[in-house]
């Protein structure tokens, strides 16, 4: 099979995943307000009685009307809210799944013994968006963006590649721009690797720090929900087991990779002679971090700070959308999981994946309506896009060619020496 055919099939596969994800989200997150059965409400009759089509008062036909069932898969769509002019009593005019209209008194939706729960639709969320909180979330999202640039610059210096911070920051925004619009949220790493390799003779060492930066970012991302799971026994074993397996596997793999005893056991120094020189240099740069544990700790702390401010910005975004039942601890648990799903390279830019994850996590936990979960995922994506736009300016200005030359220093040990470290 030719390369062009494989590439075309891959594009079709990702387009299919995108359509399925977006389609599933749209079936759950509705544009209009809907009513569903309230938790713990009494039984309802399966037969329904339609409101008179010529009714002009919100209370016409209510006395003889049976309350229709409204499941999450077949909710009642709110057409309008009417008020009876003489009494001022409110009522909901709704449409059931069979197309029939019903008039429900407001007491069955807003009263203390409500039979129905109102789920705000996407239109209501946009009209009621708190722009002050949304603007604060946008400003706060700039902190993790800056911290990610600082972390990468710090790792480059640790690996022996010195670039001016402003140059690293420009490359960082360049990568963010391509991360946003390329599949899986990792395409920008390729662009960053290509750009920085043209600025230093230690290009392999520079590229290796991109890999380390990505790994530490993912580790910091999952450490936060793991800590939340340890503090909350009500979350069950499945989530804790999944996070534990991932983090445990990461810890074991890291211990084996950085173990000098394991390298002697597998005779790595002899194996390295058979590998391409580029791979040996790449391994040497990463393995050299074994002697820089404090630097790795600093980078990990920067990752945790990055996730903290990103989650805090998401929390403010949720408050702007009217998500009031979710506490900050819920965001520390759900947001990292949604971002991990968004990074999977199975959709274009992760579109639909993050929105679906927010919808599933928040709505599944009863903390938000499906429309609110979808809107939160969409809002977070818009915040990311806003902060990725400076990378587009770098592209327009020819940022990949205009960067100043790097001041490179030789790493602490040569590739051959690192292969035989005790």
Image (spheres, helix red, strand yellow):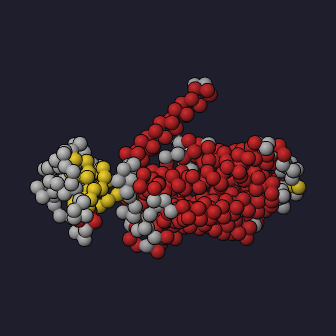
Q: Is residue 175 left or right of residue 115?
A: right
Residue 217 placement (x, y as % from top left): 63, 59
Image: 404 above or below 106: above
Q: Is residue 383 left or right of residue 35?
A: right
Residue at image position (79%, 42%) is: 398
Residue 395 placement (x, y as % from top left): 74, 43
Q: Is residue 242 left or right of residue 62?
A: right
Residue 18 placement (x, y as % from top left): 49, 40
Image: 159 above or below 195: below
Quarter occupied by the N terminus? top right
Depth check, front residue: 24 or 230:
24
Q: How many marks?
A: 0
Depth check, front residue: 365 or 55:
55
Q: Is residue 168 visible?
A: yes
Residue at image position (30%, 56%) is: 81
Depth check, front residue: 415 or 191:
191
Seen as rendered, the residue at the extreme bottom is: 231
Residue 116 sits in quarter: bottom left
Q: Is residue 161 visible?
A: no
Residue at image position (54%, 65%) is: 133
Residue 171 placement (x, y as % from top left): 75, 51
Q: Is residue 33 left or right of residue 230?
A: left
Residue at image position (45%, 43%) is: 22
Image: 382 above or below 19: below
Depth check, front residue: 353 or 82:
82
Quarter occupied by the C terminus? bottom right
């Amino acid at each position: 099979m030719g390369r062009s055919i494989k590439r075309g099939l891959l594009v079709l596969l990702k387009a299919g995943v995108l359509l399925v994800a977006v389609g599933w989200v749209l079936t759950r997150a509705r544009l209009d307000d809907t009513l569903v059965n309230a938790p713990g409400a009494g039984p309802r009759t399966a037969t329904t009685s339609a409101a008179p089509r010529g009714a002009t008062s919100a209370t016409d036909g209510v006395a003889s009307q049976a309350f229709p069932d409204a499941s999450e898969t077949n909710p009642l769509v709110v057409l309008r809210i009417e008020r009876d002019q003489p009494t001022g009593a409110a009522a909901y005019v709704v449409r059931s799944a069979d197309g029939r209209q019903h008039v429900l008194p407001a007491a069955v939706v807003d009263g203390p013994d409500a039979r129905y729960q109102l789920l705000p639709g996407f239109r209501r969320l946009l009209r009621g968006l708190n722009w002050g909180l949304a603007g604060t979330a946008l400003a706060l999202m700039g902190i993790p963006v800056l911290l990610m640039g600082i972390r990468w610059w710090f790792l480059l210096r640790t690996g022996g590649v010195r670039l001016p911070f402003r140059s690293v920051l420009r490359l960082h925004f360049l990568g963010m721009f391509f991360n946003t619009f390329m599949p899986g949220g990792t395409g920008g790493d390729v662009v960053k690797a290509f750009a920085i390799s043209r600025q230093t003779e230690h290009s392999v060492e520079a590229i290796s720090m991109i890999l380390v930066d990505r790994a530490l970012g993912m580790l910091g991302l999952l450490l936060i929900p793991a800590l939340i799971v340890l503090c909350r026994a009500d979350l069950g074993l499945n989530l804790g087991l999944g996070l534990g397996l991932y983090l445990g596997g990461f810890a074991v793999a890291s211990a084996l990779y950085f173990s000098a005893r394991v390298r002697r056991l597998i005779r790595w120094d002899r194996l390295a002679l058979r590998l391409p020189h580029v791979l040996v240099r790449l391994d040497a740069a990463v393995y050299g971090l074994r002697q820089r544990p404090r630097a790795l700790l600093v980078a990990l702390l920067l990752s945790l700070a990055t996730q903290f401010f990103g989650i805090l910005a998401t929390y403010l975004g949720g408050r702007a959308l009217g998500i009031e039942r979710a506490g900050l601890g819920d965001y520390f648990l759900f947001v990292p999981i949604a971002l991990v799903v968004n990074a999977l390279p199975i959709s274009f830019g992760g579109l639909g994946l993050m929105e679906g994850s927010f919808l599933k996590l928040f709505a599944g936990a009863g903390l938000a309506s499906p429309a609110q979960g979808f809107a939160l995922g969409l809002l977070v994506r818009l915040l990311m896009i806003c902060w990725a736009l400076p990378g587009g300016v770098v592209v327009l200005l020819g940022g990949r060619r205009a960067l100043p030359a790097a001041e490179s220093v030789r790493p602490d040990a040569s590739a051959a020496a690192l292969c035989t470290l005790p």
